[in-house]
Image: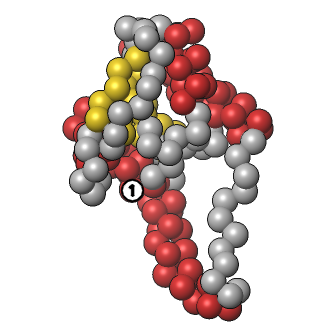
Amino acid sequence: MILVDADACPVKREIQEIALRRNVPAIFVAATYLRLPEHPLFRMFVAGDAFDAADDAIAKVARPGTVTITADILLAERVVKLGAAALDPRGREYTSATIGDTVATRDLMAELRPGMMGQQGGQSSGPPPFGPADRAAFRNGLDRILSRIAKAGA
């Protein structure tokens, strides 16, 4: 099963294509309703707009054999600790071996950001633009994880 942190997910279409090709259910979780193609493999879950509602909903069902698509490092940490796979929209997999360093880097950057912004006139560069190479890396990453999950279940 694919669980999608869908509010700002730039790869919804790629997820749908891969879910259809592999016959894997995909649940899109968001604060408000998102329109999805009519298909029995796709489900929409409206978690509401409470703080971390979508994250909490995903963490309740994440388990070994599921993959969560999210750019939220703290959600990725939660699902990895539950034994699930986690992938960001740029195709980078979060694992139990890497998630601790990823969270530490996130925390360090959050601490440094106010000082850096003061030096740069309040500007932060942010991530690079999302492009075709990112979409391809995501497709490859999701296929790799789903193959691994299918192999483990066989």
Q: In this view, does 73 lie to the left or right of 109?
A: left
Residue 139 visible in the current orientation: yes
Number of numbered discs visible in the structure rendering: 1
Report the residue marked by disc 1: 74
Can the viewer see residue 63? no
Q: Nearer the viewer, residue 61 or 34?
A: 34
Residue shown at 77% from the left, 38% from the top: 133
**Measured from the top left, where is residue 21 in percent x and y?**
57, 9
Q: Residues within 10 Å of mark 1 (few under 14, many from 20)?
A: some
* Image quadrant containing the N terminus: top left
Where on the picture, by quarter, is residue 115? bottom right
Residue 23 rendering spot, x and y as whole percentages: 47, 8
Vertical side of 60 occupied by 81: above or below: below
Residue 112 image position (x, y, % from top left): 55, 83
Residue at the spot 58% in from the left edge and 39% down from the top edge? 10
Q: Looking at the picture, which amino acid does disc 1 mark?
A: Leu
Q: Would you say 92 lies left or right of 150 here?
A: right
User: As drawn, is 106 to the left or to the right of 52?
Assistant: right
The quadrant holding residue 103 is bottom left
Q: Is mark 1 on a helix, strand or loop?
A: helix
Q: Which of 37 and 110 is in front in this view?
A: 37
- Looking at the image, which residue is at 33% across and 43% down? 31
Residue 154 horizontal/vertical position (percent) = 41, 9
Query: What scheme was used to colour the molecule?
Result: secondary structure
